Image (cartoon, helix red, strand yellow):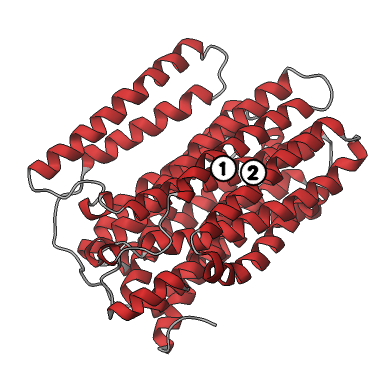
Amino acid sequence: MLPGDDRAARRVLTVCLAAGATTLLDQSVLNIAVPALRRSLSAGATDVQWIVSGYSLAFGLALVPGGSLGDVRGRKHLFLVGLSTFVLCGLVAATGTHPATVVVARLVQGAGAGLVNSQVIGTLQDVFHGLDRARALGLYAVTGGVAAALGPALGGALVALCGPGTGWRLCLLLSAPCGAVTLWLAARRLPPPRRVAAPGRPDLWGLLCVAALTLSLMLPFISTPDSGGAAALWGAAAPAAAGALVLGQWWRVRRGRVPLVHPSLIRSAPYTLGTLVAMANFGSSLAAGLVLTLFLQSGLGLSALTTAAVTLPSAVAMGVSSAVAWRVVRRIGARTVTLGLSVGVVALLGGALAAVTLPLAALPPVLAAVQVASGAASGLTVSPNQARVLQHAPAEAAGVAGGILQMTQRIAAAVCLSAVSGIYLRGASSTEGVPRTAFAVASVVCAGLLAAALPVSLALPRVPSGAGRVRGRAGAADRTSSEAP
């Protein structure tokens, strides 16, 4: 049942869910077409890594300034501009004839998607309150997650039906009709733009430091023939960028300006801890999905359609587990997230073990079963964690809070996609025959990310304190939203 009794609010929710599904589907639908794209454009490993991770990087870096602009100037016009950019750049990427064209188009497309999604989070926070807000945010998280899980299956079907050369282009074109319909609905149904925060200068220094930090973490894993010295240099730059970010945030607070991370969010332990969990889960999931499709197609030699059949159970399991996740939340509270992470760790380790021990013929059905467990784990983790995190955002920072949450997830995705795919591609290139060990190592790395998030999830409070709750309607509604979706 959709949250809210107002028909207009439900229409707004439909637009927001469509936008989230379209932009997250566009990320994952290309994964299964990467081998075909690589052959068609004669793209190198570095090009592939930028195509798959550049979208997430630009997506993440556009979220916070987009959320801040939405808080100050209103959300509708920014939503329409971002979605128009997303659709047009998708067309450019789909018709590109050179890897550089696709890389640049995906970067700009990711920035458009980030601008859209920062308005989505802010709009849901503006329109819904209390219990309805928690449900709306939960539906948004589940819709995006299921769309991302469905992406490989849809991509596999397109590549199988239309051939590799045309199939990868259709994967990129898939967002065009979805985006066009969403654009039309948004122009009609989104509420008129209004300000929810006082005007102020964006924290450009903070954004610059975040971009530098992200690149310094990504680039050591980007495969280049002579990247040894450059990788060491970028690795050393990461602590400097992090220090500059902390210093800049402190300085803005001293000057009475709002920093990149809103002060009330810094003081909220549930927001901070939940964001760390979301980063680990999102980065691990996307990286594991990409490596799986590469292993199935390039390693085992399976067709795109067969690969899609192996990955499809993840989407089905996530949809089912998301539907029952809130019943689990009512019983064990925040430990639902811990349970989901634990299942995810076991699934990834099981897939790694199967890859190095089982006969090749047995791997597709076993990995499909592993995908069932992985999808169920995501369903138990994504929606409960996101709803709990965002209910601590103050109204004047709703867009920024949602932007920061998604930005951190997208930055984690960019780094993880680069790192894990780099680990797999280097291992596969140095192995004759099926790269079993390379896949197993990459899966263990993804499992390690989830395992690192386990103690963080255990530190999440069972019931948020009154001081951290959303300034929405009555306190009773907020108490309900913290206990049930």
Write down the quadrant of residue 9 in the picture: bottom left
Is there a contact, CB below 8 Å, between mark 2 and mark 1? yes
Residue 411: % across, % down: 44, 41
Q: Residue at x 28, y 81 (%)?
A: 474
* Residue type at numbered disc 2: Val
Disc ID at residue 450:
1
Above-or-below relation of 421 to 378: above
- From the viewer's perspective, tell me whether residue 403 is left or right of residue 73: right
Residue 292: % across, % down: 71, 41
Image quarter of the N terminus = bottom right
Disc ID at residue 345:
2
User: In the orientation shown, which residue stands out farthest toward the left?
Assistant: 255
Write down the quadrant of residue 323 in the picture: bottom right
- From the viewer's perspective, tell me whether residue 117 is left or right of residue 74: right
Above-or-below relation of 233 to 413: above
Tell me which label, 2 or 1, sits earlier in the chain: 2
Residue 66: % across, % down: 31, 55
Front residue (pair 428, 256): 256
Write down the quadrant of residue 462 in the picture: bottom left
Above-or-below relation of 54 to 335: above
Above-or-below relation of 464 to 188: above
How far apart are labels 2 and 1 at the CA level? 6 Å
Q: Residue at x 31, y 51 (%)?
A: 64
Disc ID at residue 16:
none
